[in-house]
Amino acid sequence: MFKLYDRFKLVKINSTRFHELFNQRSENPEACIKELRRYQKDGVPLVIEGVENSAMQTFLNKNWKEEYGELWIQGWGLSPSEPWMKWLTPISPNPEMPQSFIITNAPEGPTLQLVLVNEVQ
């Protein structure tokens, strides 16, 4: 029998959920990480959306252990570094604003296909 869960290439936590958990971290950081890990699936990266500042990034870097699995983060608080910038162009001309990027000089190779599904309650 086909199971959708077996076809996941990554699991993504949206910014609203991450912010809810992050705002509770001072009371119990372990509980925050435990709840993030609840969304994991073995063998695929966990992507956390909405990392908007260095405190959020520091919290994840400090509390996410390597044995938990692969963690990817994205959000306004992050900027691409080299070598990625040679393939990306900011969408906004204002460097003071949070940036989104478009791929400009992408190398040949595979592309990422992202499929989002709602959690079944």
Image: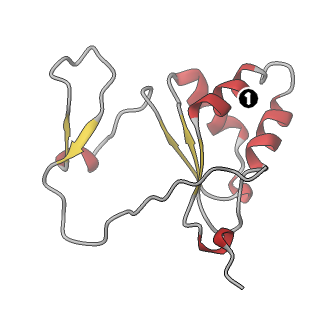
Q: Residue furthest bottom?
A: 1
Quarter of the image that includes the N terminus: bottom right
Q: Residue at x 84, y 35 (%)?
A: 30
Secondary structure beneath dot 1 equals: helix
Query: Could you say where residue 39 lies in the image, as x and y percent from the top left?
Result: 73, 51
Q: Is residue 44 left or right of residue 22?
A: left
Query: Could you say where residue 50 lies in the image, as x and y percent from the top left?
Result: 53, 31
Q: Residues within 10 Å of mark 1 (few under 14, many from 20)?
A: some
Count of numbered circles on the image: 1
Query: Could you say where residue 40 lies in the image, as x and y percent from the top left?
Result: 71, 56
Q: Residue furthest top?
A: 96
Residue under pointer 1: 21
What scheme was used to colour the molecule?
secondary structure
Q: Residue at x 69, y 51 (%)?
A: 119
Q: Residue at x 80, y 19 (%)?
A: 26
Q: Nearer the viewer, residue 15 or 25?
A: 15
Work out whether 111 lies above or below 27: below
Query: Could you say where residue 46 lies in the image, as x and y percent from the top left?
Result: 61, 53
Specify the quadrant of the image occupied by residue 56. top right
Q: Residue at x 71, y 67 (%)?
A: 42
Work out whether 111 lies above or below 36: below
Work out whether 39 lies above or below 56: below
Work out whether 83 lies above or below 115: above
At label 1, the amino acid type is Leu
Q: Is residue 31 left or right of residue 87?
A: right
